[in-house]
Amino acid sequence: MFLPDALEVLAAKKRICLPLGLEPVAPLIDTPPPPAATARARAFAIAAGNEALIRSCVAVIANLSPFRGVSADVGTVYEVGLARGLGLALFAYTCDPRDYAARVLADPDGLDIEDFGLSDNLMIEGGIAGAGGTFLRVSAPSADPWRDLGTFTACARAAAAALAARPR
């Protein structure tokens, strides 16, 4: 979403999904940001469009690589939570092989740092597992986690296989 070439990256991901039998939707492509009177109104219109896209899906594939810090993008995590609440199938990946605890050196307030051997907060991976989904983690760091189509492709293949195996 935040890449200067976001439309190209999203289009490439769509091209990966189609031969797998997945019908992808992507913000910016399927719900272009609308004009609005204020930045706040535009932000809320984008949020509503993203939620509508999720509601139109049977599954979500999310990039949960650390974003601007040690954890996944909070907006993406919100979308994963929304999808879980809607009962959608969930699939996710991260291009960072480290556990969450390895990325957090210390808490400035002295609070405990959860160390369950997970990539991020236990509720994220727990929700994906609870939905019967797959969470993929690379074995070596990706040079460009936002354009890493190899990890995305592996996740899309896992999603396609799981969705094809579901009773209709």
Image (cartoon, helix red, strand yellow):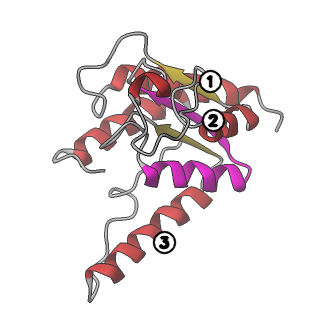
Q: Name the foreground residue: 56 vs 62.
A: 62
Q: Is residue 137 above or below residue 104?
A: above
The residue at which mark 1 appears reads as 116
Q: Position of residue 39 (x, y in %)?
A: 26, 79
What residue sits 43% from the left and 38% below the top?
107
Query: In this picture, is 74 found above or below 105?
Result: below
Write down the quadrant of residue 22 in the picture. top right
Of labels 1 and 2, earlier in sequence is 1
Query: Within 10 Å of the Cα at label 3, are there few (<14), some (14-19), or many (20+) other Cα atoms?
Result: few
Give the spatial CA distance, label 3 vs label 1: 34 Å
Q: Residue at x 52, y 41 (%)?
A: 111
Tell whether 50 sits left or right of 125: left
Q: What residue type is labelled 2?
A: Leu
What are the residue bounds of the magenta stretch? 74-94
Magenta run includes residue 97:
no
In this view, the mark in front (2 or 3): 2
Query: What SS does tag 1 mark?
Result: loop
Q: Which of marks 2 and 3 is nearer the N terminus?
A: 3
Which numbered marker is on residue 157? none
Q: In which quarter of the image is residue 90?
A: top right
- Distance between the Cα atoms at labels 2 and 3? 27 Å
Instruction: Please name the residue that numbered disc 3 is placed on.
Output: 48
Q: Which residue is painted at 31% across and 50% down in the image?
A: 1
Of the residues shown, which amino acid type is indicated by label 3? Ala
The location of residue 96, given as percent across then percent down, is 38, 23
Disc 2 target residue: 122
Can you tell which of label 3 and label 1 is closer to the viewer? 1
Give the secondary structure at mark 3: helix
Q: Are marks 3 and 1 in contact (CB under 8 Å)?
A: no
**Badge 1 vs badge 2, beta-carbon distance below 8 Å:** yes
Work out which quarter of the rendered image holds the C terminus and state it.
top right
